[in-house]
Image (cartoon, rainbow, N blue to C red):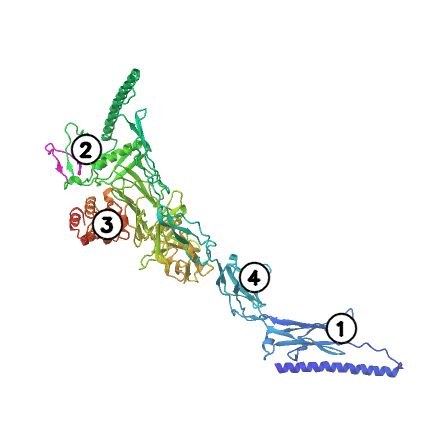
């Protein structure tokens, strides 16, 4: 085909030349004939010479898009003929479209020609040179050629030579995002998108696009945190690169130091401290936390206060006219300095100096008046004494006949072994003899223990140590009335009370007058508080499924007094946190009260914590804090730094701590890393999903990051229950390290043919500071999914949760979203199903009789060291023995702490083993006979 077309084009060109020659011949013949018939003039006017053709329009380069041919056009004047020549060969005349016109100005002929070039013609060309076409125009003066116009096939490859990569940049840092577009013809033009909006450097001078299509951000701003996309385009197509996420982070900066605190020692050597916080600025978007300590301490010395002391009395003065003499003393031995107390007492003392034989004489009238006044005063004294006696008698009768409904039967159930006395025959309902308050084992009359008596019953005392009369009676409520309040106290039927306790309960009815009943008004949250009325026998308050409890040992509350005691877990959104600087909250903030209550011995507050303590070297600096009435937090003690002035003792276990304290209030445990190793805190990861069947295309999964404490899990379970969520599986444990790295969550292995994730980024992150400080609770991330149709019901995927450069956990999820999910609410670890409050002896594992014998055996110091100190060592309570040494009964405080540590297992074996190792066989015998060890 190609040779035939070339021959045809050559023939056409030859014909054109032949026609031109013929025209010139004919013109010559005609002029010859004319010359023969006419007489030629001497001179002819010269005809104007025709110029060479000039191109008014030359063909331009063109691109073939897909299979659409391109049009090439040229225009020349003057031109008798005009043709295209492509790749050195003439284009067939039939392929030309020619138009002719006359220039109105010059009168010259203007010729215009078009040709069409197809994709096939371009592809048939072989060689290194591109397909080109050139326009040739003729006139009488000669020929003119146009510039070459190249025809190429347009294309744009799919793959970028280099795509932009996501990165992190600090604030005000220069950022370079590189992009190399795909190969294309013509070369692709490049645009940059920021969150799908085109970047125009003329509108924002902070952006610069280089000649190599790279994007430069001169100074990174927080607003530049976005998704960036490189877009390449030409006449054929438009290509998008993968999205590069730029995160502009802010590294933390220290604030100014606070003022130095007051010296913590009131007397002698102590220390002062000042703090700073990483808030200038605060770390943002994963920025580096501030380096250096947040707290500085320096030693200080406070002058000790010296209380004033009296000097010796001076000599008596001379006897004066009033028959008295006086003497004085001064508060100068030593004088009070540095805030010491002033001397108490009077500075002067006077007395009669004549031993009653005063030289002054009274007038007769004055003596009668004096004796009359003495007689009247004596009579008034007698009348007042009689009145007081009558009032005391009536009051005593009121106590013996009080308004306590069924108190006799309620209070005598399961008493300690005692003796039984039959009632007097003359008054079987109200015995006239007062009860014996001094007896060790009380003797009670018939109204206090109503049992049928036969006529032949022995009227003497009956031993009740093994009598069936000690069987427990059902619990009864004792109604107690006073002038302003109405309360009810529920006592266990098997609680043993002495006569003194009965009178104490009876005195509750008159406490409105005697001001002996203390109460507290609580703002109760369901499941976060408990309360009970406790007396001298003590008891235990427990908030179920939270690990928080308060043990009130026997004898803590003074005899005859009753307190409405409470225990509350403060909600995080309603209290200020005790942490500051790099400290982290490790336990719930708990309030116990009433505050200001008079305690005879320490109580034990049990708090769960989430500090990881299984390392051989200490990684934590743990501090117990209390909240003042003004809302500020103060340090109570730092574990390992106790002194004799420390008001508390903290016994630390792996999952909880027990605090011995003598002042009720609001407490919380905080901690910070102890260099050089970073500390770890235990977190629980809980996965939740909607419980009800999913009726829409959208589906959501929520993952919570909470402290590994029973209270934190209970709080999230209650929250999700209110939102209609359900726990899919048991929470997973994650050790979160103090390394300033964020917690990263991502979802994987989604069946993309049925599900689509709405998350734009590849993962989500919870900032480190939010988790470590505990300022936001509860922390969670949500994964929103969309199914392809309502017919899709099965969901299987994998959710990964890990700390960057740390540990992680994986959830393998497989569920049917169109079924109602069963509730999955496991009992939090470390919690027990104990009642919320226990009153009296049944709140304690160790009977009071055994406790007293152990204390009597171990309180006294032993030369061999076989005393309470060895017991503390055996039980693991010997971290700071000086605290127990300052108590009247160190053994009793140790047993109270043992009761708090073993409230869940209720096992006496550990205590018995410790006593056996100490060689206290006599105590073991008592425990075997009187207890149930």
User: Label for residue 207?
Assistant: 4
Seen in the picture, residue 850 relative to 740 is either above or below; the reply is above
Regarding residue 692, the answer to whether it shows in the image is no
Label 1 vs 3, first from the N-terminus:
1
The location of residue 666, given as percent across then percent down, is 35, 45
The answer to which of 363 and 722 lies nearer the viewer is 363
**Which secondary structure lies at badge 2?**
loop
Q: How many other residues sit within 10 Å of disc 1, few (<14), some (14-19) or many (≥20)?
A: some
Q: CA distance from mark 2 to mark 3?
A: 36 Å
Q: CA distance from mark 4 to mark 3?
A: 71 Å
Residue bounds of the magenta highlight? 436-464
The location of residue 292, given as percent across then percent down, is 42, 57
Q: How many other residues sit within 10 Å of disc 4, few (<14), some (14-19) or many (≥20)?
A: some
Q: Which residue, given by chain and number where applicable, does mark 3 sit on?
A: 906
Residue contact at pointers 1 and 3, CB within 8 angstroms: no
Q: CA distance from mark 1 to mark 4?
A: 55 Å
The location of residue 908, given as percent across then percent down, is 21, 50
The answer to which of 674 and 914 lies nearer the viewer is 674
User: Label for residue 109?
Assistant: 1
Label 2 vs 4, first from the N-terminus:
4
Residue depicted at 56% across the width and 61% down the height: 207
Mark nearest the camera among 2 and 1 is: 2
Quarter of the image with the N terminus is: bottom right
**Which secondary structure lies at badge 4?**
strand
Residue contact at pointers 1 and 4, CB within 8 angstroms: no
Q: Number of labelled discs?
A: 4
Q: Which residue, given by chain and number where applicable, does mark 2 sit on?
A: 435
Residue contact at pointers 4 and 3, CB within 8 angstroms: no
Residue contact at pointers 2 and 3, CB within 8 angstroms: no
Q: Is residue 346 left or right of residue 232?
A: left
Label 1 vs 4, first from the N-terminus:
1
Residue contact at pointers 2 and 1, CB within 8 angstroms: no
């Amino acid at each position: 085909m190609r040779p035939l077309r070339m021959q045809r084009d050559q023939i056409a060109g030859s014909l054109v030349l032949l026609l031109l020659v013929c025209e010139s011949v004919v013109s010559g013949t005609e002029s010859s004939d004319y010359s023969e018939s006419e007489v030629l003039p001497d001179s002819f006017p010269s005809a104007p010479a025709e110029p060479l053709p000039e191109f008014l329009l030359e063909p331009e380069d063109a691109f073939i898009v897909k299979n659409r041919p391109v049009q090439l056009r040229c225009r020349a004047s003057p031109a008798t003929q005009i043709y295209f020549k492509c790749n050195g060969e003439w284009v067939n005349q039939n392929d030309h479209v020619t138009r002719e016109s006359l220039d109105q100005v010059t009168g010259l002929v203007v010729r215009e020609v078009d040709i069409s070039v197809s994709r096939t013609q371009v592809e048939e060309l072989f060689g290194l040179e591109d397909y080109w076409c050139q326009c040739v125009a003729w006139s009488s003066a000669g020929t003119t050629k146009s510039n070459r116009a190249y025809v190429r096939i347009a294309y744009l490859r799919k793959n970028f030579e280099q795509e932009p990569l996501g990165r992190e940049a600090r604030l005000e840092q220069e950022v370079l995002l590189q992009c190399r577009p795909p190969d294309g013809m013509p070369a692709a033009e490049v645009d940059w998108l920021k969150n799908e909006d085109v970047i125009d450097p003329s509108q924002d001078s902070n952006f610069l696009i280089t000649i190599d299509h790279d994007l430069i951000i001169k100074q990174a701003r927080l607003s530049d945190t976005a998704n960036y996309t490189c877009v390449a385009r030409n006449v054929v197509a438009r290509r998008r690169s993968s999205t590069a996420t730029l995160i502009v982070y802010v590294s933390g900066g220290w604030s100014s130091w606070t003022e130095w605190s007051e010296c913590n020692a009131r007397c002698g050597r102590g220390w002062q401290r000042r703090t700073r916080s990483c808030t200038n600025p605060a770390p943002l978007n994963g920025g580096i936390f501030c380096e250096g300590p947040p707290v500085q301490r320096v030693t200080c010395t406070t002058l000790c206060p010296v209380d004033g002391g009296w000097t010796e009395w001076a000599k008596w003065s001379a006897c004066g006219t009033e028959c008295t003499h006086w003497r004085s003393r001064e508060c100068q031995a030593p004088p009070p300095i540095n805030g010491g107390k002033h001397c108490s007492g009077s500075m002067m003392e006077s007395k009669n100096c004549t031993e009653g034989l005063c030289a002054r004489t009274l007038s007769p009238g004055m003596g009668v008046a004096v004796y009359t006044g003495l007689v009247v005063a004596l009579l008034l004294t007698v009348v007042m004494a009689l009145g007081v006696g009558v009032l005391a008698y009536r009051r005593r009768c009121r106590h013996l006949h009080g308004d306590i409904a069924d108190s006799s039967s309620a209070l005598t159930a399961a008493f300690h072994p005692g003796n039984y006395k039959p009632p007097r025959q003359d008054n079987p309902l109200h015995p006239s003899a007062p009860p014996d308050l001094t007896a060790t084992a009380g003797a009670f009359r018939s109204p206090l223990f109503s049992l049928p008596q036969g006529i032949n019953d022995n009227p003497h005392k009956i031993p009740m140590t093994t009598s069936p009369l000690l069987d427990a009676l059902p619990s009864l409520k004792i109604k107690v009335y006073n002038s302003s309040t109405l309360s009810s106290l529920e006592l266990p039927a098997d609680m043993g009370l002495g006569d003194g306790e009965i009178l104490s309960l009876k005195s509750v009815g008159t406490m409105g007058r005697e001001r002996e009943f203390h109460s507290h008004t609580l703002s109760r949250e369901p499941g976060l508080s408990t309360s009970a009325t406790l007396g001298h026998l003590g008891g235990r308050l427990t908030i179920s499924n939270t690990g928080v409890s308060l043990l009130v040992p026997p004898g803590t509350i003074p005899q005859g007094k009753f307190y409405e005691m409470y225990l509350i877990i403060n909600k995080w959104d309603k209290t200020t946190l005790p942490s500051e600087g790099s400290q982290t909250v490790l336990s719930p903030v708990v309030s116990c009260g009433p505050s200001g209550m008079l305690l005879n011995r320490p109580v034990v507050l049990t708090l769960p914590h989430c500090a990881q303590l299984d390392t051989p070297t200490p990684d934590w600096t743990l501090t117990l804090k209390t909240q003042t009435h003004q809302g500020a937090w103060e340090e109570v003690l730092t574990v390992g730094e106790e002194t004799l002035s420390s008001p508390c003792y903290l016994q630390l276990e792996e999952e909880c701590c027990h605090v011995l304290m003598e002042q009720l209030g609001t407490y919380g445990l905080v901690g910070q890393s102890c260099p050089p190793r970073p500390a770890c805190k235990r977190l629980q990861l809980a996965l939740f999903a909607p419980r009800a069947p999913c009726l829409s295309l959208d589906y959501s999964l929520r993952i919570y990051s909470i402290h590994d404490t029973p209270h934190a899990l209970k709080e999230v379970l209650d929250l999700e229950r209110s939102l209609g969520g359900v726990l899919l599986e048991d929470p997973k444990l994650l050790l979160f390290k103090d390394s300033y790295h964020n917690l990263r969550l991502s979802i994987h292995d989604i069946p993309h043919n049925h599900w689509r994730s709405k998350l734009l980024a590849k993962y989500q992150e919870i900032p480190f500071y939010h988790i470590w400080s505990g300022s936001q609770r509860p922390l969670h991330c949500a994964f929103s999914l969309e199914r392809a149709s309502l017919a899709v019901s099965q969901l299987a995927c994998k959710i990964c949760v890990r700390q960057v450069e740390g540990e992680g956990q994986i959830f393998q999820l497989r569920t049917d979203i169109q079924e109602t999910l069963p509730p999955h609410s496991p009992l939090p670890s470390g919690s027990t199903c104990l009642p919320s409050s226990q009153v009296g002896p049944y709140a304690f594992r160790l009977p009071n009789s055994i406790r007293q014998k152990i204390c009597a055996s171990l309180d006294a110091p032993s030369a061999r060291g076989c005393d309470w100190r060895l017991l503390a060592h055996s039980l693991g309570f010997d971290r700071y023995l000086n605290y127990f040494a300052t108590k009247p009964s160190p053994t009793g405080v140790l047993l109270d702490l043992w009761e708090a540590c073993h409230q869940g297992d209720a096992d006496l074996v550990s205590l018995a083993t410790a006593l056996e190792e100490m060689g206290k066989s006599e105590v073991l015998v008592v425990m075997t006979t009187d207890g149930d060890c």
